[in-house]
Amino acid sequence: MRVLVTNDDGIHGPGLHALVAELGRWADQAPAGEERSIIVVAPDANYSGASSAVGDVFSRDGIGYTRTEIPGAEHIEAYGIDAAPALCTIVACRGAFGPPPDLVVSGINLGVNVGRSVLHSGTIGAVLTGGQLGLSGLAVSMQALKGAPLDDGAQVAVAVLDELIAAPARTMLNLNIPALPLAELKGVRRGRVSTAGIIKQSVAEEAHPPSSLAVGETGSIKLNLGSATPELGDTSDEEPDDDGALITAGYASLTVLRGISENTDQDADDLIRRALVAIEGHLERTVS
């Protein structure tokens, strides 16, 4: 079992260091006859909010990288590369750093990824990318409070690995952990992705509304943040089993994610048939 570790906070992120150190202990404790290895391929800069973006790969001749050491896990091969988390996953899966991995573990992100931030998170984007390549994966995030016990969070994450490895290929999990030591953590619950968003409202400068600007003039937009912020805001409007509400209540939240796939439901089939007929009719009228 070869595990790829990546993140979106960057190769020097303390959350990644805590996770790699714990994964190193997990690998060292492999049962007789079972091989476990860890490879770290993570961005060399912060790519928070990058989702599954890979950037403009068409104009690049190559991707720069640097061999590095992870504190407390110096024996584990680690590289910081000039790429977003999704691209880190792709190049690792395509053989740039030796044998391709069997599993992707991304994090620990400093800041929970709950609600609609699931769509925008680079931490989760790496796991979704792995899923598209046939791999299962685990995204791990922790509430970004001062003194957040990342080492404890890493233990929670590693505890789920055996179940993830035994699950069907392309199984993707999102684990969010409150900033609590293990002794104070109330437990782990299945979390439902809430409707909480990072951005609650966007407001243009009152003195320079967009419609008043001439071409070439610039303005500024202020963002009012919602509950799905790194620290986790007010979740009082969420249901008790929503992911953000679970964090607030002192539970870790575990969610099974589904990546992008074709919608084959009956309603979708009916829609596509109608759309094809409409397009074909338009084309026939245009040609004639």
Image (cartoon, rainbow, N blue to C red):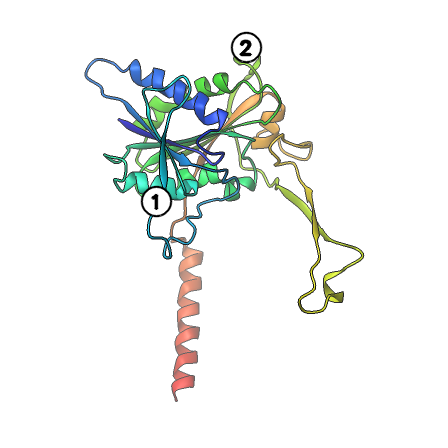
Residue in view at x 34 percent, y 34 percent: 136
In the rendered image, which residue does mark 2 sit on?
183
Circle 2 crowding by C-alpha within 10 Å: few under 14, some 14–19, many from 20: few
Residue in view at x 46 percent, y 29 percent: 12
In the rendered image, which residue does mark 1 sit on?
132
The answer to whether 35 is drawn above or below residue 200 in the figure is above
Residue in view at x 28 percent, y 24 percent: 37
Tags 1 and 2 touching, CB below 8 Å: no
User: Looking at the picture, which amino acid does disc 2 mark?
Assistant: Ala
Residue reaching furthest to the left: 33
Say what secondary structure mark 2 lies in: helix
Question: Marks 1 and 2, Cα distance to the nearest angstrom?
Answer: 37 Å
User: Looking at the picture, which amino acid does disc 1 mark?
Assistant: Gln
Residue in view at x 40 percent, y 70 percent: 276
What's the mark number on residue 74?
A: none
Can residue 258 be seen in the rendering of this structure? no
Q: In the image, is 59 to the left or to the right of 250?
A: left
For the C terminus, which image quadrant?
Answer: bottom left
Question: Residue 196 or 220: which is nearer the viewer?
Answer: 220
- Mark 1 or mark 2: which comes first in sequence? 1
